[in-house]
Amino acid sequence: MLARRPALGLLRLAAPRWRRVRWLSSEVTEASQAMRAKVAAALEATSAEVNDVSGGCGSFYKIDVESPKFRGLTIVKQHRLVTDALKDEIAQAHGVTITTKAPTTTSERKE
């Protein structure tokens, strides 16, 4: 008996390539600028970027934040700080992708 191949949709979900998704467009809208300012102020971010990757309709955002407040925290706690800062905005969006990191100092780079 021949093994049945799973449906194409199942293969796509199971494939680790989901991280390689390229968005069709990435826009800086008024809403994304307001979110960037809010998260940068709340977390004293050294770098913050918020892009509307849904084509301008505001349903999906990509958020990248670098803050010294993240130092020593797990990724889950870092993301929680971002979602707490943007709680109202995230509640209205369909989805978000969050990338966080703590800045490295020159002494950490030497070690």
Image (cartoon, helix red, strand yellow):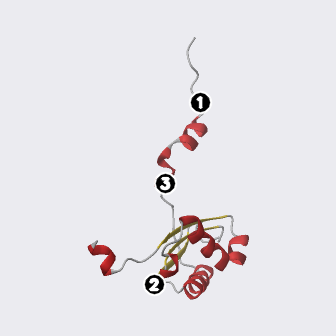
Q: Amino acid at mark 3?
A: Arg
The quarter of the rendered structure image containing the C terminus is bottom left
Q: Secondary structure at mark 2?
A: loop
Q: Quadrant of residue 102?
A: bottom left
Q: Are marks 2 and 1 in contact (CB under 8 Å)?
A: no
- The residue at the point 57 percent across, 88 percent down is 41
Q: Secondary structure at mark 3?
A: helix
The quarter of the rendered structure image containing the N terminus is top right
Residue 67 x/y as whole percent: 49, 80
Q: Amino acid at mark 1?
A: Pro
Marks 2/1: CA–CA distance: 46 Å
The earlier-in-sequence mark between 3 and 1 is 1
- The residue at the point 30 percent across, 74 percent down is 109
Camera-side residue of 42 and 111: 111
Q: Which residue is mark 3?
A: 19
Residue 39 x/y as whole percent: 58, 82
* Direction from residue 94 to residue 19 in the image, left or right: left
* Direction from residue 17 to residue 57 in the image, left or right: right
Camera-side residue of 57 and 68: 68
- Label 1 crowding class (10 Å Cα cut-off): few <14, some 14-19, many 20+? few
Marks 3/1: CA–CA distance: 21 Å
- Give the total of numbered labels: 3
Q: Amino acid at mark 2?
A: Thr
- Label 3 crowding class (10 Å Cα cut-off): few <14, some 14-19, many 20+? few
Q: Which residue is mark 2?
A: 46
Q: Secondary structure at mark 1?
A: loop
- The residue at the point 65 percent across, 71 percent down is 58
Q: Which residue is mark 1?
A: 6
